Amino acid sequence: MAELKYKEGMYTVVALPLPLPKNFIYSVPTNLISEIKLGLPVFVPFGRRNLTGYITSFCKNAPEGVKQIKEIVNPEPLFTTEMLELFTWLSNYYLTPLGMVISASTPSCLSIREKVIACVKETNVEAIKGNDTALAIYEELKKRPLSKIYIRRKFNDSKDAYNLLLRKGLIYEKAIKMQPVRKEGKSGVKLTSSFDIKIFEKFEKNAPKQAEIYNLLSQKYDGIEKSELYKKSGNVYSSLKALEKKGLIEFFALPFTQRIPYLSKKKISRPKLTHPQKEAVGRIRETIENERYETFLIFGITGSGKTEVYLRTVEDVLRKGKSAIILVPEISLTAQTVEVFKSRFGELVVIYHSRLGKKERVEVWKGIKEGKYRVVIGARFAVFAPVKNLGAIIVDEEHESTYKQKVKEPLYSARDAAVIRSRIEKGVCILGSATPSIESFNNTKKGKYKLIELPERIDERKLPPVKIVDMRQEEDFLLSRTLKEKIEERLKNAEQIILFINRRGFSNFLMCRDCGFSPRCPFCNLTLTYHKKDRLLKCHYCGYEEDAPGVCPKCKGIRFFYAGMGTQRIEQYLEKKFPELKVMRMDLDTMKRKWAHMESFFRFRAGEADLLLGTQMVAKGFDLPKVTLVGVISSDTVINFPDFRAQERTFQLLTQVAGRTGRGILGGEVVVQTYSPEHYAIKESQSHNFEGFYRKEIEIRKELNYPPFSRLARIILSSMDEKTVKFSSDELTEKIKKSIKKEKFKIEVLGPAPCPLSKLKGRYRFHLLLKCRKPFLIQKILLPLKNEYRVRGLHILYDIDPTDMM
């Protein structure tokens, strides 16, 4: 029987980050007995390698021949018993081994890893003559040892050649232990004694760079950051070493502080609450005071003051000596959120997301764990922040599909994890949205969540009027006459504009007008997107790119048709049509730098651009009073997807983007361009009528037995070989059906069929869908199959509660 407290003589149960269905038992060496506790990361042997695992419990008995723990990676536990309960729930619900869940919740650089490197052994290459790849690898290894991963990336089809070198004894493998990143402040430098004019004058004659540094440090009594010194004086490495050798300076560790550029230092005033806000704050406060779990859904129209309710909730939580986590769906939305929270709570606030560097992520993680930071803001990953005494988790824009992890296990929903974590730790969970997900809104109808409504905007401002433009009646397929006229008006009045288009690049695809040839991705079987600035054709799914042809490779024609549109094409169009217009573009291509999204947001708010053009990054969360016009270039990109949530996403996207205007005294309006003006999702978004949309959508979901009336699981099979994936999908479906029949469960199976994106990254893809009304029945069917059904060269993803059907 597993226990949570260690007693001498017990064995440890260790979860390893491997796709294996069980945990492993290890004995404790005598020298580590006093240090062993739940949650510790430990370095353990597994087969021919060593791994970092996590102690999840203890047991009195073990099978013969159990191996010993090699070492403790970190003397402090990585998680509490409450977090272990959350990890266990996620593991069971999303069919992911516990070790993989724990590994995904902590920075990878906190683990000891082993890197396998190859080294040269023999010099006789007769045995590999005729194999050019093996010879090339061998010649490269003669210069220096290389990691297996590096060799795989540098040399195409290197697997057979590498194995040949191993078999012939020309190379051997060696495992190198990669230590975890330790907590270290930034290096500072200061003088060891007071400034001496004689020393300075001597340096001025013989070593001017040392004189410059010596003089600069004399003005900084407490020292200076090395990085700041490099900025002011250039490359001073050798000069610093010389001064250190002479005993004139010393290096010291500076305490870590997260630096967030572009943030305004101006204090944001604490506004007076509206009556609905007061009621909302009061209901949440009562729950916090009584220290009981509750999930609230704040259904507040855009601009109704949900953020102020969040802020007051965090105030109440901090007053109780507890901590709060605020989740946002996109890293781009952290800019304004961080600004208002920093203004209110200062140094207690920290950003925690995947764009942080390795060292910074470790510093932030440890600062959260120690209680230095009690207000954590971040995207999906932040739901696992190791805060002390959790009081509340706030999930802003809870309807967003980006809260669901895709592609890599565990395929968890951060929103649902927030609800479960709050329940375990007896905290408050707040889900907020102007367009709640159908499932969350239905949960309020069933009494699972408490509904809080904010039905009016701050200062009684009106929601912006929405003009629907039927593009079938327009000559220009990019911008309608109405939208062009509205842009000209804003230019004259010196007001700002947001234009939204859900595609980046210049055009969706390139086509030869003589023979119809269109370049496709060789790995994904999709047309390549044309990026005019780089003159490249790119695949947005696998990253493949090639030069755009000047001549058709099929018929040698030179007449090309650039079909469709993206952010680059609209940007070029605007530059030609409105030369005086200052345009700022915000998409994945322009937001690659760490703080780029923050810089762009604050620059636009400061008036450095007249028009913000972007993808989904600009569609939600921004509060910009000078924006009086929002234009949706094409509202049809999502509505035609083969996905039962396509209508819901269209309504949410249009309502959210419309909410970016009319937030100031200037008012605002919205222009939506569409080829489907009669569609109910577009019509209801025109009147900002969520409940009207909900009534129509819930009837369709009920008729087709889709969520919230059923639970879904999507199984995606992929392989480099099309026959393998087709045969395996049929075989797995039959096994699932037999298992359902045996258990007498009411589970509907749809498929198998090719995925809408039938080939990605060189792999052919099939999927099947399971529907069931009761929770966990699907997991009971799939868990044994997930552990047992394996085919060489086949990859299977089991996606519980999928948000993506592509």
Image: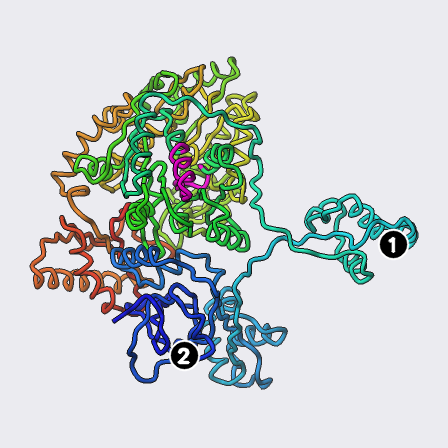
- Name which quarter of the figure residue 231 lies in: top right
User: How are the residues colored?
Assistant: rainbow
- Viewer-side residue, 131 vs 250: 250
Q: Check disc 1 and report the residue beneath it.
A: 207
Horizontal and vertical percent for residue 656?
35, 29
**Which residues, given as a range, are shown in magenta?**
311-333
Q: Is residue 238 visible?
A: yes
Q: Check disc 2 and report the residue beneath it.
A: 68
- Viewer-side residue, 174 vs 368: 368
Mark 2 surroundings within 10 Å by alpha-carbon count, few (fewer than 14), some (14 through 19), many (20 or more): some
Q: Is residue 511 visible?
A: no
- Viewer-side residue, 322 vs 155: 322
Q: Secondary structure at mark 1?
A: loop
Mark 1: amino acid:
Ala
Q: Is residue 468 left or right of residue 69?
A: left
Relative height, residue 184 to residue 497 (above, below): below
Say if the magenta span includes residue 398.
no
Mark 2: amino acid:
Gln
Residue at x 57% of width, y 26% of height: 608
Relative height, residue 672 to residue 506 (above, below): above
Horizontal and vertical percent for residue 98?
32, 62
Quadrant holding the N terminus:
bottom left
Structural distance between the alpha carbons of marks 2 and 1: 57 Å
Say if the magenta span includes residue 319.
yes
Q: Is residue 45 left or right of residue 456?
A: right
Horizontal and vertical percent for residue 382?
41, 48
Which is more N-terminal, label 1 or label 2? 2
